[in-house]
Amino acid sequence: MESATTTAEGTLLRNKIRGYARDQRVECRMKAKDSLRIGLGQVKQEVAALEMGIKDVTGMASRIKRRKHATSEDLCRLSLGFLQGNDNINAFAAIPGAIQVLVKELTGPHIQRQTDAVECLCNLSLGEAHVSEKIVTLAGSYMVTYLDGKAERLKRSCLWTLANILATCDKAGKILLQMQLVPKLWRLYSDASGCQEDAAICLSLVATHCLQHVSDEDRSYIAQNLPEKIPEQPARDYFMYIVHQLEIVNQEHKLGAQQAEYLVRFFEATLAPPADRLSLIYGVRVMANLVALGDPSLMGALADPQNLVKTLNQLFALQNPDLSLDLMRLLKNYLQLNAADSNLVLDSLQIYA
């Protein structure tokens, strides 16, 4: 079964993730500025915080390490410093014990301080792989655990940080997946939690960067809980990419009739305008894999030749070369089932050159 992505599709996904990262950095920056404005009340101090260099960051790191404590103002200043360049991030990460102070605040009793700490770690995680590895080693289990909590801001900040890490460091991603991250992400993606977009980004990054570390248990969990994701909920355009890249539909992972029927219904929902290009391409690939299982009882509405032809014609009419190739593969797999008169099906198709 085909699992490779084209360059154009990879670019589309990267653009989605880049836009997400930009938005979360802006939100972190605005929160940090607001905290400084409220907490300090001095414009010159705020400006100074906005112009932090390596000396400023190392000085703050030494102070919080000596005190074994970081205030909300400390955390917000450091957050701003990390946004200003990788040199600041590397300088902080190189000081033994500095990250441990952030983790101490992350695990403390105050929810606001926890949130400030994870947002600080979020900006720290914009650094290189070795920084992400340190963060996961010291704080990964806490961030994964907080995904089960009720504090939405804290959960979202954890998801932002995990997304940065998953995109940066393979070793850190492997560690996170061993902490049962995938089932937690799927639950957040499926629940009306306000975090569906963020969970979808994380799952997409797992499928893109950590595929070799996804366990059979993780795949089975997603397969069994596919119907939990309602097509009308946010972030549905990531669904088919995640299902396809994680190889949820294949000979090794048996799908039940309920799960298969749900996939067909979800695919039909993606056809409604405005249709997302990624959803269409990967939806067709998932359907092709579903038909390739060789069991017509798993095809739901697509088992009806008239419905299949109608769907194929609707998609062929888009005249997208990449999509058309996948449609031909879906058609080939269907004809090999001998579930309908092949000539009748072919005569009913409207394939545009």
Image: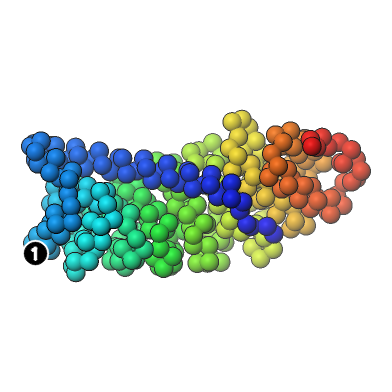
The correct choice, above or below, for 293 with respect to 344 in the image is below
Q: How many marks?
A: 1
Q: Quadrant of residue 351?
A: top right
Nearer the observer, 229 or 338 = 338
Query: What's the image's color scheme?
Result: rainbow
- Answer left or right for 103 relative to 227: left
The secondary structure type at the circle numbered 1 is helix
The correct choice, above or below, for 145 with respect to 316 in the image is below
- Answer left or right for 132 relative to 101: right
Q: Residue at x 80, y 41 (%)?
A: 304
Residue 54 appears at what percent x and percent y?
A: 18, 56
Whether residue 137 is visible here, answered yes or no, is yes
Q: Quadrant of residue 346?
A: top right
Residue 152 appears at what percent x and percent y?
A: 33, 44
Q: Quadrant of the C terminus?
A: top right
Q: Residue at x 27, y 52 (%)?
A: 85
Residue 155 appears at what percent x and percent y?
A: 33, 49
Residue 311 appears at what percent x and percent y?
A: 74, 37
Q: Quadrant of the N terminus?
A: bottom right
Circle 1: residue type = Arg
Q: Residue at x 61, y 53 (%)?
A: 5
Q: Which residue is mark 1?
A: 66
- Answer left or right for 233 relative to 287: left
Nearer the observer, 332 or 223 = 332
Q: Residue at x 9, y 60 (%)?
A: 63
- Answer left or right for 146 relative to 117: right
Task: Tell me the crowding category of disc 1: few under 14, some 14 to 19, or many 20 or more residues within 10 angstroms, Cα based.
Answer: few
Whether residue 147 is visible here, answered yes or no, is no
